[in-house]
Amino acid sequence: MKHRKPILQTILGILLGLLFLSPLYILVVNSFKTQKGIFSNVLALPDSTYFTLNNYAEAWKQLEFLKSLFNSLYISILSTLAIILLTSMAAWVLVRRKSKTANVIFYIFALSMLVPFQCVMLPLVQIMGKIQFLNPAGLIFMYLGFGSSLSIIMYHGFIKNVPLELEEAATIDGANAFQVFWRIVFPLLKSITVTIAILNLMWIWNDFLLPQLVINKPGWQTIPLKTFYFFGQYSKRWDLATAGLLLGMIPIIVFYLFAQKYIVKGVTDGAIK
Amino acid sequence: MRPSKLTFTLFLLPVAIAFSAVVLIPMFLGFFYSFTDWNGIGNSYHIIGFSNYLTIFHSDSEFRNAFFFTLKFAIASVILINVIGFSLALLVQRSSWLNNTLRSIFFLPNLIGGILLGFTWQFIFTKVFDMLGSLLHLPFLQGWLSTTSTGFWGLVIVMSWQLSGYMMIIYIAALQNISESIQEAASIDGVTPVQRLFKITLPLVSPAFTIGLFLSISNSFKLFDQNLSLTGGAPYKSTQMLTLNIYNTAFTMNNLALAQAKAVLFLIMVAVITLTQLYFSKRKELEL
């Protein structure tokens, strides 16, 4: 296959790349048109009669964009931090304790990956309502619970291959378990930590159903949540909708441009585990 | 160093509390509620045995439709996602500036959330397809999402657009593990490219197919956001998948116990299907 028809392959690749990008092209060109412009020609670039920047101004206002962006960042970053700090500790003792209890606990985490969210959501909302957890702090607590399985499995697999000598040396020097973990072990987990952080950031950032059940109140809504209601309100206003959808996508696309290498590695490692 | 029992408990406790409160307890409570007439208001309920399950099997045609719709959707998308993903991987597996850029483009849709994706494609199917249809005189491009079959294919297209790039990444990683020497030996022995694909490449990347199939099957069955935002189940709930049916049973019809029974059946189904697939894929891997 080497060097066979490389030109054909190149052309095919470029065409497919354009096809994959075409939905974004459609969004971009129409977000700069008035409603009339969209109905007159949905494929063309905006010409001077129909060009407008007003869609973005209006969508920005309706989405309360900065507020929603802040809510999304706040929820996903704090949840990811909690997951990283607490599941790495848990996975470490699960590996090192080497007891039957530790094994059973690990398998419970692993098996729970099969449980679809729909199976727990109704009792979950009832319980969380009772203990006054239907708020952003409660949501972060819930993401810790839902994110723990995958993160523990991945940390577990990684820690198994971390040599014991360093930990033993530190113990002999009089360090307690807390010091051993945070000073010696955690720094060794850096590469897997980046992977786990990215996997969690991505699903929490895009998650819709859990926030809808837990923090569906004005002022607390995240980008997917706000977009959903914005769209419901303006479903026939494609001029505003296209601009709003693009605004909602920009943060994750910018993140992708900067962290692409880590994202791709994270996804590959996450899948293979 | 082997942690003491105290260290073990202390280090595990925060996660164990969150996990129990969010996953374990709700799951067992959910099993229990599926045998009651729980309605979510207050604590009152009666145990009614298998009544909810019998209702589902005997008189819930919407659930049955959702089941077959989900099954068809899963079959079509799993095939398309993996075929496209693997083809893309073959196309761009060699590192070059162009191929790396193409990889980034193919993977990009995966990062955008289901709600935003569904709305974006709603625009494309209803407005862009419509215009292309009238420009090119292709009537089948018109009226998308207004019928069951266009809603179905709409969902399949969105899902393939989103997940093919993800599978591509997994398959590229697998292809790059095949050693150059095997490829070279094959080409010296006069193996044709087609033979090489079926006799060498495919068997050697079969562990990646196990993963690719597993991920695409479970993602297809559990799909919710895209279904909600692209078709919302329309027309007449005919494009409603199982997750959306459970959601509507709970929040539109306010029948929480019935929704919970459906969710339990859904859990059993997803578990049986994915575990069966893993079992057979692993056995196939060993044979090859």
Image (spheres, coloured by chain):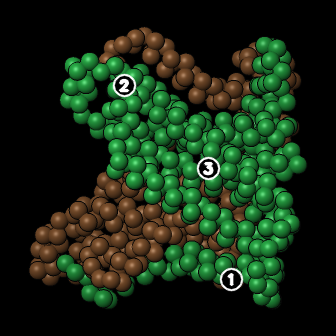
Looking at the colours in the rendered structure, which chain would you say is drawn in brown? A
Q: Is residue B174 above or below residue B18?
A: above
* Direction front: furthest residue: B287
Please give the chain letter of the residue carrying mark 3.
B
Which quadrant of the figure contains the N terminus of chain B?
bottom left
Where residue A152 sits in the image (x, y, percent)? Answer: 40, 67
Along the line of sight, the residue nearer the viewer: A26 or B50: B50
Horizontal and vertical percent for residue A187?
26, 62
Residue B217 % position (x, y):
56, 50
How far apart marks 1 and 2 lie (CA) works out to 55 Å
Q: Which residue is mark 1?
A: B32
Residue type highlighted by circle 3: Ser
Is A181 situated above or below A60? below
Chain letter of the residue carrying label 2? B
What chain is colored green? B
User: Which residue is identified by label 3?
Assistant: B220
* Residue A36: percent from left, percent from top: 87, 24
- Residue drawn at x 80%, y 28% as measured from the top left: B127
